Image (spheres, coloured by chain):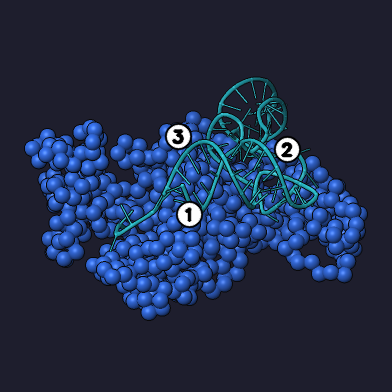
Amino acid sequence: MYGEATEPAKVQVNTTPSDFTGDYSVVIFPFVKVAKKAPDAAAAEIGAFIQEQVPELRAHNVVKGFLNLEISDTYWQQFLQNTVSNPDFGRQPRTGKKVMVEFSSPNTNKPLHLGHIRNILLGWSCSRILEAVGYEVVKTQIINDRGVAICKSMVSWRNFGEGKTPASEEIKSDHFVGDYYVLFEQKSKEEYAQWQNTAEGQSVYASKQKPGQSAADFFKDYKNKWFNEYSQLGAEVRETLLKWEDHDPETIALWEKMNGWVYEGFEKTYNDLGVSFDKLYYESNTYLLGKDIVDDGLAKNVFFKKEDGSVWVDLTDAGYDQKVVLRADGTSVYITQDLGTARMRYDELGCERFVYVVADEQNYHFQVLFEVLKRLGEPYADGLFHLSYGLVELPTGRMKTREGTVVDADDLIADVIRIATEQSSERGETEGVSAAEKAENLRKVGMGALKFFIIKVHPKRKMIFNPEESVDLQGQTGPYIQYSFVRINGLMQRVEREQIDLSKAADYGHMEAQEKELLVALHEYPAVVLQAAAAYDPSLIANFCYALAKSYHRFWHDLSIFNADTEAAKAFRLQLSRAVGQVLQSAMGLLGVEMPNRM
RNA sequence: GGCUCCGUAGCUUAAUGGAUAGAGCAUCUGACUACGGAUCAGAAGGUUAGAGGUUCGAGUCCUCUCGGAGUCACCA
C-alpha cells in the first residue's frame, strides 16, 4: 500500500481495550505521513485493505486513528483446538545454543535469607524462561567458601564449640554454623570493650584521637584497625586464613567439616524452594584464576603495569575509573577472579551467553567486568548480562544482621506453609484427600504465595517485603491463580468421570465477550514468554498469569458451564477451560510455582 | 562531590511513545436452592515528586530542580 514497504517494527498492534469493539487494534499514526491523509481516512483505507486480504478478519472499525480488528470465530475455534492439543504451546524450538545462568552464590558462614530467596527465584525462573525459548541452560552458582568470614566461624567453633555438632544440638546444620559466626561477632565485641579500658587501649585513644573526639566516637571508628592490630581473635582469624592458604591439614579438615555442615543445610533449603543446579563452582578453586588473563591483557595493551608492579586497566574513556587487576604483590583481586572464571567457563561449558543474577549493589563491578572482557576481545563478550535486582527491604527498612532483622529463608518457608494450612483447615474444602496429599497441596499453596509475591515485582525495583502481605492468599497472589487452576481441575475430573464428549465444541457459534477475552489472553502467551526472555524479566510472566486467572474467574462467575444452553457451548467452555488450565500450569511453571489439585 | 538507578491512590504495585494511567490490599456496598465465595460486581481513592522541552500523542524520551537509594578499596 502507498507504494512503500513499511518496517514490521513500525506496525503497532495492541489488544483492544474492552470498551471498544474488536480484538486487536492497529495504531495508524505512524502511517499518516506515508498515506498523506488524515488519520481516520488512512485507517479506513488500511482497514478495507486488510479486510480484503485477510479472510480471518470478520469486521473492523475506526476510532480516532485506531483501527480495531475483529477476528472471526472460526479462527478462534481453530486456535483453541490447536492450543489444547499442543502441550508445548508457548515454547520455541531448540536453538542449539547454550546459556549459563549464575544465581544464589552464597557465603558459607551463615544460612540463606530473604535476599537469597529473591535472587534464587529470579535465577530459577530466568533459567526456565530461557529454556522455554529454546536455549540449553546451565544453572550454576559460585560458592564463596573461603575468606575472613568463614575463618571467623571456624575460630569461633574451635574456641567455644566444645566439640558440639549439628547432630548433637539438633540444629539445622547451616544454622549451627551461622550461630558460631554470630557468636564470634559477640565475643569480638566483648573483647573490644574490655580492651578499651586497658592501659594499651587508653594510650591509643590518647595518642590518636582527633581534637575533641569523644572516646565512644573514636573507638567506633577505630574498630577495624583494632581488629587487625590488637585483637586476639583477629590474630587467630588471620592465622587461620594463612594456614588455610598454606594447606595446613588440620585447618583444611576443620574447614571441610564446617562447610560440609553448611552444604547439607543449603541442600535442604534449595530443595524446599524447588531449585537445583547443574554445575557448582567454589571460590576456593577459582580465587587464584585470572593471572593468565592479566598477562594476556598486558600483551594486548589493554592493561598496563605501574612501577610498584601492580597491574591496572584504564577505562576512563568509557566513563569508568582506573581499576587494579593485580596487586603489587602479584595476588588477584575480586575482578581478576571474575575475569578468569568467565574465560574458564566459556572454555568448559561452551556457552555463548552468560547471565549473572547479582544484586544491584554490584552494578558498577559488572559494568567494569564486561567492559574489560570486551576490550580483551573475548568471543562471548557480547553475550554477557548482569541481571541486576533491587535489594529486599522490610517495611522497617533495610535488613541488618547486627539488629537481628534478617528474615531467615527456612523460617519464612515454614511460616507460609503454616499459614496456608491454617487457612485451609478453616475452609474445610479438602475432604476425602489423604493427609499426605493434603500436605503436599498446602506446601504448593504456601510456596506459591511466597514465590509469586516476590517474582511479580519488576527485578530492578527495590522491593518492600511485608511478611504479612507475603502470605496473603487473596487478590493478586499466587493462590488466586492456583485457585483458578483448582476450579478447572475439578471440571476436568468431572469430564473424565462422566465421559463427556468435547468434540461438539466445534459447533459452538457466537462467542461471549468473556470467552473472547480468554482466547485473546491465551493467544498472547508465546509472545509474553519471548518478551520475558528478551528482557530477562519473569515479572512479565507473573502479570500475564494474574491477568489470565482474573479473566477466568470472571468467565466462571458469569457463564454456566455444565448448565450451558447447548451441548456445543458446554463442550466449548470445557475445552476453553482446559486450555486455560494448561497455559496457567505452564506459565506458573516458568516461575517455579507448582499447581495444587485441591486447596 | 562524580557516576548509576528510583520517585505512580493511604500501602504494595502495572502500563513495547498510543485511546478515559490498570490492579491488589485496606475502607464502604452488593452477589451462592447453580460447576468450590481463596470468587465476582460496584463505590471511593491520582495534577504519575515539581518545572520546562521534543512529539499528532509523554508515566515512558531530553534538560533543570527537589527527595530517596546504590557505588566510587591493591574488600568481596
Q: Nearer the viewer, mark 2 or mark 1?
A: 1
| Furthest-front residue in this view | A211
| Mark 3 / mark 1, whichever is N-terminal | 1
Q: Is residue A401 left or right of residue A78?
A: left
Depth check: give the residue in front, A282 or A360. Answer: A360
Secondary structure state at the residue bearing disc 1: strand
- Residues at marks 2 and 3, common chain? yes
Q: Residue at x 44, y 40 (%)?
A: A393
Q: Disc 3 marks which residue?
A: A395
Quadrant hosting residue A179: top left
Corner quadrant of residue A145? bottom left
| Marks 2 and 1, the one that precedes in the sequence | 1
Type of amino acid at the residue the image marks with label 3: Pro
Residue A430 in sight in this render: yes
- For the residues bearing labels 3 and 1, Cβ distance under 8 angstroms: no
> What SS does tag 3 mark?
loop
**What is the chain letter for disc 2?**
A
Q: CA distance from mark 3 to mark 1?
A: 22 Å
- Observer-side mark, 2 or 3, equals 3
Judge by depth and name the residue closer to the eye, A568 or A589. A589
Q: Are marks 3 and 1 on the same chain?
A: yes
Image mark for residue A363? none
Mark 2 in CB contact with mark 1 (< 8 angstroms): no
Q: Which residue is mark 1?
A: A388
User: Which circle's residue, 2 or 3, is located before the other in the chain?
Assistant: 3
Q: Chain of mark 3?
A: A
Name the amino acid type tagged 2. Answer: Asp
**Location of residue B24 with respect to A24 vertically, above or below:** above
Q: Which residue is mark 2?
A: A558
